[in-house]
Image: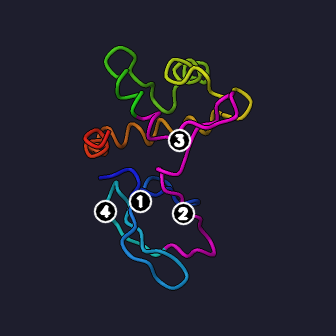
Amino acid sequence: MKIDHILAVTGLPGLYTMVNERKGGLIVENMADGKRRFAPSRKHQFAPLDSMAIYTDDGDAEPLRKVFSRMLEQQEDNPAPAANAAKDEVFEYLADVLPNYDTERVHHSDLKKLLKWYHFLKDNDGFSATDEEE
């Protein structure tokens, strides 16, 4: 699975892949259970993980693809904490992975999502295709 084919859908938990496009929305498939559903564009917004990034203090943003890559590289020495870990532990981990993240614009809720997605993709071989590309 390529990371640019994976979607986050507002209002729906988890990660999705687009199955088909229909008038007024998308048919998406939940990656966890394989269930398909119609997600109307009037109610939901769709964001490919490939288009997301984490703010850095130099005014730029680090793409999630690169952040996930760094997290995978450090997995043996510095494993990622659980998404429900203590706030301090989560921010300390991000400081190891991305030392120049913007402390003002990156929130704990963002990191909880990042960690949930990372653990889900790692456990379901979601990084196998991205490793070969890079």
Provide the residue designation for mark 1: 16
Left or right: where 126 falls relative to 100:
left
The amino acid type, in three-letter code, at marker 4 is: Gly
The amino acid type, in three-letter code, at marker 1 is: Tyr
Provide the residue designation for mark 3: 113
Q: Nearer the viewer, residue 73 or 8?
A: 73
Q: Earlier in the sequence, mark 1 or mark 2?
A: 1
User: Residue at 48% of width from left, 50% of height from top?
Assistant: 49
| Quadrant in the picture for the C terminus | top left
User: Residue at 67% of width from left, 34% of height from top?
Assistant: 107
- The residues tagged by marks 3 and 2 sit, at their Cα atoms, a distance apart of 15 Å
Q: Earlier in the sequence, mark 3 or mark 2?
A: 2
Provide the residue designation for mark 4: 34
Q: Is residue 17 above or below residue 70?
A: below
- The residues tagged by marks 3 and 1 sit, at their Cα atoms, a distance apart of 14 Å
* Residue 76 picture location, percent across and down: 31, 18
- Give the secondary structure at mark 2: strand
Tell me, for residue 46, which label it has, or none: 2
- The residues tagged by marks 1 and 2 sit, at their Cα atoms, a distance apart of 10 Å
User: Residue at 32% of width from left, 58% of height from top?
Assistant: 33
Start-end of magenta stretch: 39-68
Q: Earlier in the sequence, mark 1 or mark 4?
A: 1
Q: Earlier in the sequence, mark 3 or mark 4?
A: 4
The amino acid type, in three-letter code, at marker 2 is: Phe
Residue 8 painted magenta: no
Left or right: where 89 falls relative to 129:
right
Q: Which mark is nearer the camera, 4 or 2?
A: 2
